[in-house]
């Protein structure tokens, strides 16, 4: 199987939009404040993404594009139904978010282990939900 057999820009865009739609409310209303406090404790200045200028926004865009690409290339080919979408998406999300969270925990003195655990679980939930939604949207013929 050729790795690019599963690639399509319309599916990449679908997963990108779904990631943003599901993740932004979580980050804004649930996880944002404790995460921002932890980052400030580590770097001594407030966390700035949008206010941080073009380079910060470019970094965020890169993260979401890579996450959408990961779902497209590694989860979508394995989806047979809602359960496999949830399972494969959840597994990949937990791995990706877990690698980030526990690397940061290992590197930064003030990194909070509890937030790392929440991040790991959220990665699984986020990727699982997005994978199921993508499967459902494809099944309805909307893409």
Image (tube, helix red, strand yellow):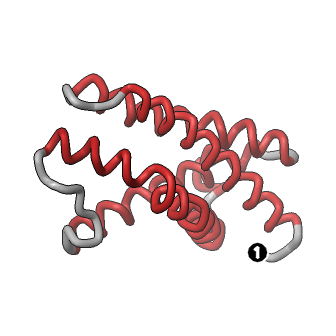
The residue that appears at 37% across and 61% down in the rendered structure is 62
- The C terminus sits in image quarter: bottom right
Residue 61 at least partly seen: yes
Residue 60, placed above or below residue 118: below
The mark tally for this picture is 1
Work out which residue is located at the far top of the displayed protein and give it: 106
Residue 89, placed above or below residue 65: above
- The N terminus sits in image quarter: top right
Q: Position of residue 7 (x, y in %)?
A: 61, 60
The residue that appears at 62% across and 44% down in the rendered structure is 74
Residue 96 at least partly seen: no
Nearer-the-camera pick, 114 or 81:
114
The residue that appears at 50% across and 59% down in the rendered structure is 29
Q: Which residue position holds label 1? A: 143
Left/right placement of residue 141 relative to residue 16 reads: right
Element class at badge 1: loop
Q: Position of residue 69 (x, y in %)?
A: 53, 55
Q: Quadrant of residue 122?
A: top right
Q: Quadrant of residue 121?
A: top right
Residue 102, placed above or below residue 20: above
Left/right placement of residue 40 relative to residue 117 reads: left
Q: Position of residue 91 (x, y in %)?
A: 63, 34
The residue that appears at 67% across and 55% down in the rendered structure is 130
Work out which residue is located at the far left of the displayed protein and give it: 44
How dense is the environment of label 1, judged by Cα within 10 Å: few (below 14), some, or many (20 and up)? few
């Amino acid at each position: 199987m050729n790795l690019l057999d599963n690639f399509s820009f319309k599916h990449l865009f679908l997963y990108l939009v779904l990631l943003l739609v599901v993740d932004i409310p979580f980050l804004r209303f649930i996880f944002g404040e404790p995460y921002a406090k932890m980052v400030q404790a580590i770097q001594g200045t407030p966390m700035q993404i949008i206010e941080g200028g073009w380079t910060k926004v470019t970094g965020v865009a890169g993260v979401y594009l890579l996450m959408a690409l990961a779902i497209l290339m590694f989860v979508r080919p394995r989806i047979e139904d809602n359960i496999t979408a949830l399972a494969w998406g959840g597994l990949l999300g937990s791995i990706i978010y877990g690698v980030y969270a526990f690397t940061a925990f290992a590197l930064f003195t003030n990194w909070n282990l509890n937030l790392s655990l929440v991040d790991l679980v959220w990665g699984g939930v986020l990727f699982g939900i997005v994978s199921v939604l993508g499967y459902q949207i494809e099944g309805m013929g909307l893409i």
